[in-house]
């Protein structure tokens, strides 16, 4: 296999890796969004729950109900904290996936630039070869024309 074919194979492999990195990044984005939405949902539920029970407690409530309320709110706070932590971890995974994607995009661009430079160098060599052949042909024609003039 010639070098250009090898570089094209390398480019195809790097593009596949980049495409896999794009898919991974999109999936981590989706998961992070779901985690954020879940955390926001829990925070909204907590606000609604407190509002609903505030009216109840404004009237008088048995101590057992108050303790149940406080226990539930405490568990809800723990759930919110855990979900916010999960959302932060998901955001960290998104950042890592984005960095891996950026690295893959740089590799693809580097291989593409290398291929372009090689193609330009080959085209320049071909152009110089053609120019040299053209110059030599013109010299031969000129020499042959001078020989005919001299012979005539």
Image (cartoon, rainbow, N blue to C red):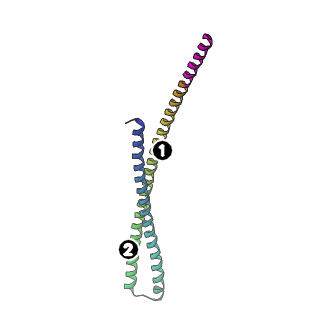
Q: How far is mark 2 from mark 1, CA to CA? A: 51 Å
User: Where does label 2 land, which residue?
Assistant: 75
Q: Secondary structure at mark 1?
A: helix
**Which secondary structure lies at badge 2?**
helix
Between marks 2 and 1 in the image, the one whose residue lies nearer the viewer: 1
Q: Residue at x 55, y 22 (%)?
A: 137
**Which residue position holds label 1?**
109
Query: In the image, which residues are magenta?
Result: 134-152
Where the N terminus falls, by quadrant? top left
32 over 12 or under it: above or below: below
Seen at 46% across and 85% down, the residue is 57
Pick the front one: 41 or 9: 9
Residue 23 vs residue 147: left or right? left
Q: Residue at x 39, y 85 (%)?
A: 65
Query: Which residue is rendered at x = 45% and y = 69% of the image?
Result: 37
Picture coordinates of residue 48 (x, y %)? Answer: 47, 79
């Amino acid at each position: 296999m010639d070098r250009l074919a090898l570089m094209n194979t390398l480019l195809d492999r790097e593009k596949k890796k980049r495409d896999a990195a794009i898919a991974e990044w999109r999936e981590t984005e989706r998961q992070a969004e779901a985690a954020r939405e879940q955390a926001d949902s829990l925070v909204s539920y907590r606000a609604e729950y407190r509002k609903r029970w505030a009216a109840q407690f404004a009237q008088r409530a048995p101590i057992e109900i108050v303790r149940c309320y406080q226990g539930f709110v405490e568990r809800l706070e723990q759930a919110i904290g855990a979900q916010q932590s999960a959302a932060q971890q998901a955001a960290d995974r998104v950042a890592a996936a984005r960095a891996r994607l950026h690295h893959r995009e740089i590799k693809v661009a580097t291989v593409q630039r290398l291929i372009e430079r090689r193609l330009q160098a080959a085209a320049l060599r071909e152009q110089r070869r053609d120019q040299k052949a053209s110059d030599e042909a013109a010299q031969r024609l000129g020499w042959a024309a001078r020989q005919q003039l001299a012979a005539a």
